[in-house]
Amino acid sequence: MTLRHFLTTQDYSRAEIDALLEQAAAFKRSPRGQQLAGKSVALMFFNPSMRTRTSFELGAFHMGGHAIVLAPGKDAWPIEFEVGTVMDGDTEEHIAEVARVLSRYVDLIAVRAFPKFQDWQVDRQDNVIKAFAKYATVPVINMETITHPCQELAHAMALKEHLGNLQNKKYVLTWTYHPKPLNTAVANSALLIATKMGMDVTLLCPTPDYVLDERYMEFGYQNAKENGGSLKVSHDIEDAYRGADVVYAKSWGALPFFGRWDQEKPTREANRHFIVDEAKMALTNNGLFSHCLPLRRNVKATDAVMDSAACIAIDEAENRLHVQKAVMASLIGQR
């Protein structure tokens, strides 16, 4: 049997995504099980986490398994990922050894590794998690790199719980202001899953500089075509919000300024008005609002929006636990 990883939902068909969401719903109804009895998962955190770490650790425990948390460079040796490197710097061991040794110990490896924000042409290769997948002999799970597939599933699950059939629902993925330039991972993933679910997606951003990487835009157009939805880009706030069934907010840095954020800052500062507020939400079709969290209140969205009945961010966050159980259970079934 060919080893299956969970690196991006683009590797999974719509039917497979639906099956994972059905399994997640089953876990939500009946949280405990023995799908991971006697099994273990190594959780590799190169970056901080609250929801991801908690939900993966608890998910493994709920299914009778055991999670081991490692932070390379802090409580584990710094890892080298380049091939052919003379390792006379800060890194102590190579991914070729790390992944293969961990594969002898555990049944799953999950990785969280953000971009370095220096060169997008390098970061877009997603080399860290791809190296784990290359050398590991057990399934590898993406806990967020330049995409966040687990967040995708939790988001889709929450939308289905509140809206039922998502086909051709108007979905607005809106850029919002943040004082710092952030990873495009959640935005990439929101675009992927909304188009895969057949929604009519509008990517709303201040200028063309904030349009997402061409790879994800192409995937989005492909998904929309295959699943009967649509995808368009807008810079018009009122037009985008009008009639929306879902508003999903996220801040991200403009890729043309990647690694040169001081040059992007004036544009970012000039567009603070992209905040999600009551006036914008009033233009929607009694639309739902969500965010992956953490969210800076009154920067990305107002208190009134966050505290409204339309906000399903907490439901989405809870669903991380259920969808990750489904992913782990499906991958452990290979072994």
Image (spheres, grey):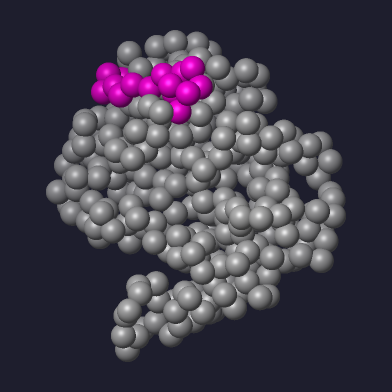
* 224 in magenta: yes
Does any portion of residue 328 appear in the rendered image? no
Residue 62 falls in image quadrant: bottom right
In the displayed image of the protein, which residue is found farthest to the bottom? 88
Which residue is depicted at the point 47% across and 23% down?
226
- 28 vs 124, nearest the viewer: 124
Q: Is residue 106 above or below residue 133?
A: below
Quadrant, the C terminus? bottom right
Which residue is depicted at the point 49% across and 64% down?
134
Quadrant, the N terminus? bottom right
Q: Is residue 148 above or below residue 194?
A: below
Q: Is residue 102 above or below residue 154?
A: below
Which residue is depicted at the point 40% across and 34% down?
219
- Position in image of residue 148 (x %, y %): 49, 47
- Position in image of residue 74 (x %, y %): 49, 77
Q: Answer with left or right where residue 170 lies relative to residue 50.
A: left
- 334 vs 151, nearest the viewer: 334
Q: Is residue 292 above or below residue 203?
A: below
Which residue is depicted at the point 55% across and 17% down?
167
- Position in image of residue 278 (x %, y %): 44, 20
In the image, the segment drawn in magenta is 223-237
Give the mark count.
0
Does any portion of residue 60 appear in the rendered image? yes
- 299 vs 166, nearest the viewer: 166
- Position in image of residue 18 (x %, y %): 65, 31
